[in-house]
Image (spheres, rainbow, N blue to C red):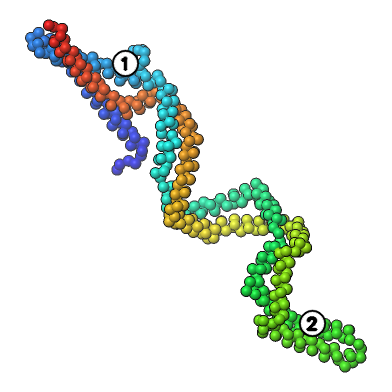
Amino acid sequence: MPSNDPTAAGSRGDAAKLAALRRTKLIATGALCLCVALFAVSRLLQPRYPWLGFVAAFAEAATIGGLADWYAVVALFKRPLGLPIPHTAIIPANQNRIADNLGRFIEINFLAPAPVREKLQEVDFAALVADWLSDPHRAEGLSRFVARLVPQTLAAIDRSGLRDFVAERMLAQLDRVQIAPLAAELLSAFTEDRRHQKLFDQLTRVIGGFLADEDALAAMREKIRNELPSLFNLFRADAYLLKKIVASASGLLEEMRADPEHPLRHEFDRFVHKFIEDLRTSKAYARRAEAMKRDFLARPELKSLTGDVWESLRRLIEQDAAAPDSKIREHLTGMFVEVGRNLARDEAIRADMNEGFVVALSSFVESQKSGVSGFIADQVKRWDLGQLTHLMEINIGRDLQYIRFNGMLIGGMAGLVLYVGELLFLDR
């Protein structure tokens, strides 16, 4: 079965590169030895076969070119034949300089603002977020993660004093609210379409209930008896008057309930509208309302109430977040899924989000790129010299070996041209 280990895959790749490098080196060395042998044989047989002078000239120059390029390639990685020749083992001797230059090269050419922005603009970050959130399973996992943070978040709010700060800010904002105009607007909304007449109907029912209560009637009769002369009480005038008062009042209440246009209803309308207008314009009402508001906000019970409400809300949230069938998690999951679906449908929002991602990430890269180049340079500087040389040699050494082939070929051609020039111009 093939291995999925990336380290093993990298080792196999390095082994293949090293084998290819060794084969190329062997072929290049063999070609150089062939040039030497060809030169020797051509020189020995040249007196008998003059045309071998061309072969000897080519082989001689090819040998020189091959040796020169062998020296150049070897000098990059080590000292040729182990000799302390100046300006050899160039890569090991300049490890720090190569590391710094490599870091700066990557910073300037790969992490420049324009290329980074251009590359980031190719990625649809918003679509990735939308696809991720639209998956109910992932959204549920995110909601569980958020729910686990709830206790720590609430505890942090308590420790930070944010709760008291918010309460103070709310009270400060309430203190700025003008109660009288606000009450006038609320009452105006309530009285639209004469909805306040329902309150009038309720008042008539309350009064009717009072008139039907035996204890209330007894108290009224006692009051009437005390106000009448004693002579009238002998003839039970108090009972007669009470009966008439109750009958008249009940009849009036029945009339008002039955007639939507009863004059007393219109009088109630005028009273309510005048009261609303006074609330809206009267300075005296405004002063009394502000005094009541400040007295209410200054009461210590209010601060205690806000603390109790917060503690109750906190316990409720913590208990629900820890419950197996948490409503908070359920609503969060639904919210995340809906956000993902809406985001997938709205191209304008996705475009704005992508632009925000590009700006944020490009700014981050710009602020951190010097650190990236420094990190790369530090890593290269920490590499073992043998490891560094080996790594570069197996990756580019095979291509460098072809320089030896080119050197032999170009050198041989140059030697052949010079030999022909010698025959044409110097042997006359």
Residue at horizontal 47 percent and vertical 58 percent from the top:
338
Q: Which residue is mark 2?
A: 216
Hey, which quadrant is residue 24 in on the image?
Answer: top left
User: 10 Å neighbourhood of mark 2: few (<14), some, or many (≥20)?
Assistant: few
Eyeballing the image, is 52 above or below 359?
above
Residue contact between numbered discs 2 and 1, judged by CB atoms under 8 Å: no
Instruction: Judge left or right: residue 236 versus residue 197.
Output: right
Q: Amino acid at mark 1?
A: Pro
**Can residue 380 be seen?**
no
Q: Which numbered disc flags the more N-terminal residue, 2 or 1? A: 1
Residue at horizontal 89 percent and vertical 90 percent from the top:
232
Foreground: 202 or 376?
202
Q: Amino acid at mark 2?
A: Ala
Image coords of residue 214 (percent x, y): 78, 84
Residue 80 numbered tag: 1
Hey, which quadrant is residue 106 in on the image?
Answer: top left
Residue at horizontal 32 percent and vertical 29 percent from the top:
395
Instruction: Judge left or right: residue 77 versus residue 312.
Output: left
Q: Quadrant of the N terminus?
A: top left
Tell me the element at label 1.
helix
Q: Tell me how far mark 2 sits from mark 1, CA to CA.
A: 124 Å
Most extreme residue toward the right is 230
Eyeballing the image, is 207 above or below 178?
below
User: 10 Å neighbourhood of mark 1: few (<14), some, or many (≥20)?
Assistant: some
